[in-house]
Image: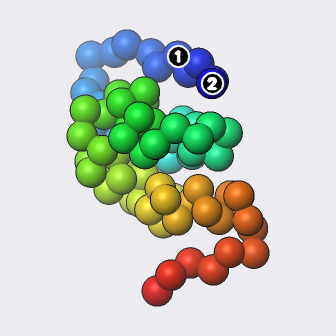
Amino acid sequence: MIAVAVPISATSPHARSPSTAGVLGADMLRDTDATVATVARKVGYEDSFAFSVAFKRARGVSPSVWRRQSADPNALTPV
């Protein structure tokens, strides 16, 4: 498992959501077999749905689709 340090700041996770979800979340989804809910908690989200929305805003696809695509670059994105 990869340990990720998330800086503590005065801003809420929602204030930094797209970048945090998109960068740290993407790395964890690619490099671990942690569930989306676990990844969400590790990057500062209590709600996996909010994490998924922020992740999709940052990456253009849902966390589960991104994980499949990162595992298989030839995977097609469902329409």
SS at mark 2 in the image: loop
Looking at the picture, tell me which residue is in the foreground, 62 or 71: 71
| Disc 2 from disc 1: Cα separation | 13 Å
Few, some or many residues within 10 Å of mark 2 (<14, 14–19, 20+): few
Q: Amino acid at mark 1?
A: Ala
Residue at (59%, 18%) from the top-left corner? 3
Image spot of residue 48 (x, y percent): 30, 44
Direction from residue 43 to residue 76 in the image, left or right: right
Q: Front-most of 11 and 60?
A: 60
Q: Nearer the viewer, mark 2 or mark 1?
A: 2
**Residue type beneath disc 2:** Met
Query: Can you say whether 63 is above or below 18 in the image?
Result: below
Q: Is residue 20 left or right of residue 46?
A: right
**Quadrant housing residue 40:** top left
* Residue under the image location 32 percent in, 56 percent down: 53
Does residue 20 lie above or below 9 as drawn?
below
Which residue is disc 2 drawn over? Answer: 1
x then y, percent, for residue 37: 36, 41
- Percent across and percent down for residue 68 are 61, 62
Judging by the rendered image, the residue that carries numbered circle 1 is 5
